[in-house]
Image (cartoon, rainbow, N blue to C red):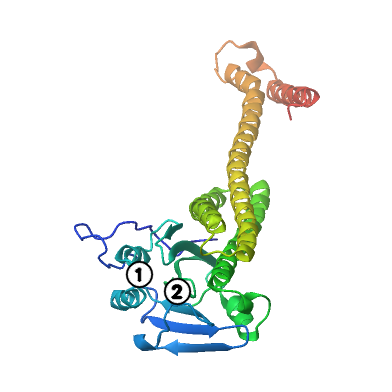
Amino acid sequence: MARSRRKRIIINKDAGLPPGELVHVGEKKTPQAAMALIRYSEGSFLEQKITELPDLPPATKGCEISWIDITGLHDTDLLARVGEKYGIHPLVLEDICNTGQRAKVEDYGEYQYIVVKMVSWDEKSQEINVEQVSLVLFENALLSFQERPGDLFGSVRQRLQVGKGRIRKQGADYLTYSLLDAIVDGYFLLIEKIGDQVEVIETRLLTHPGVGTVEKIHELKHEMIFLRKAAWPLREVISSLERDERFMEGGTAVYMRDLYDHVIQVIDGVETIRDLLAGMLDIYLSSVSNRMNEIMKVLTIIATIFMPLTFLAGVYGMNFRYMPELGWKWSYPVVLLIMLGVAKWMVDFFRRKKWI
């Protein structure tokens, strides 16, 4: 059953702190923060781990594009030094540290701040992984901030390494599109996994409905509510980026428009599964009601058949001294035959009426 690793959603920092104070809000998902750098152009590619902050390249205009990937949001000291180096506003750093952010995009003049939810399916634990990803887009560089190691960007890194497609020929805006496209693809894969589970539950619901099935339906409904909250704001983010003429070049804007269509498909998929789950609850309630009606019908038929038999047994069970039948030799078997005859006639009558 799909279960999200995020047990609760935290949306506020510690009360009383001034704006821009860096406080990590969320789970610590990596023991140590790490930085990775990818620098590329149409004819060059360099990938390396960064241990010292001065080794990070500037975000100024140049012939190469820089992608700095930072993993581990709990290291607020590192985030503060990175923010100081690249001139990132303290409020942006505060939002990066707060993992309960709603997907959004904000323009800060020299750069754009983008935050989205990245979801993936863990085959080993059969759970949904939820992670906040923050992107800071400069004219010639992209900074990405992730909660834990491991992401959906493996295909993007591979395309950069081998120089496949348009990515090495484009700027940081196209790299941003590629990362967002990988995140949206993760939504498609997750919806497909949940759709498979819905089919299994629906089959079980029609054959062997039970309390356990209802619990699984409710779990899936909670997951779909979370996905809906993550996907709907993502539509606004992609739409805003598509209309941005300063950071998004004309060629990239076309791809953003296509990505917007993909997000709409994700939202449609989420809504479809939500409707299916709501219908499955109705099916379960109808199945339980029909089963109860069948049980009550059987019990009613049994009680109805035994009513005249109980009457006869009650009459001849009174043991009055002057009952004429008490002295007959064949009274007992005659009464039993009458009871059997009445029961058979009633069963035949119920069958002709198609009540049984």
Q: In the displayed orientation, state which residue is furthest to the left.
A: 16
On the rendered structure, is 82 left or right of 118?
A: left
Describe the element under mark 1 as helix, strand or loop: loop
Measured as percent of width and height from the top left, residue 54 is found at 35, 87
Question: Which residue bears the numbered disc 1?
Answer: 88
Q: Which of the two residues, 327 or 71, is positioned nearer the viewer here? A: 71
- Residue at 42% x, 56% y is 102
Amino acid type, mark 1: Ile
Residue 293 visible in rendering: yes
The answer to whether 106 is drawn above or below residue 74 in the figure is above
For the residues labelled 1 and 2, the Cα–Cα distance comes to 11 Å
On the rendered structure, is 348 left or right of 227?
A: right
How many discs appear? 2
| Corner quadrant of residue 340 | top right
Graded by Cα atoms within 10 Å as few (under 14), some (14 to 19) or many (20 or more), the crowding at tag 1 reads many
Measured as percent of width and height from the top left, residue 97 is found at 34, 67
- Residue at 51% x, 49% y is 218
Amino acid type, mark 2: Leu
Describe the element under mark 2 as helix, strand or loop: strand
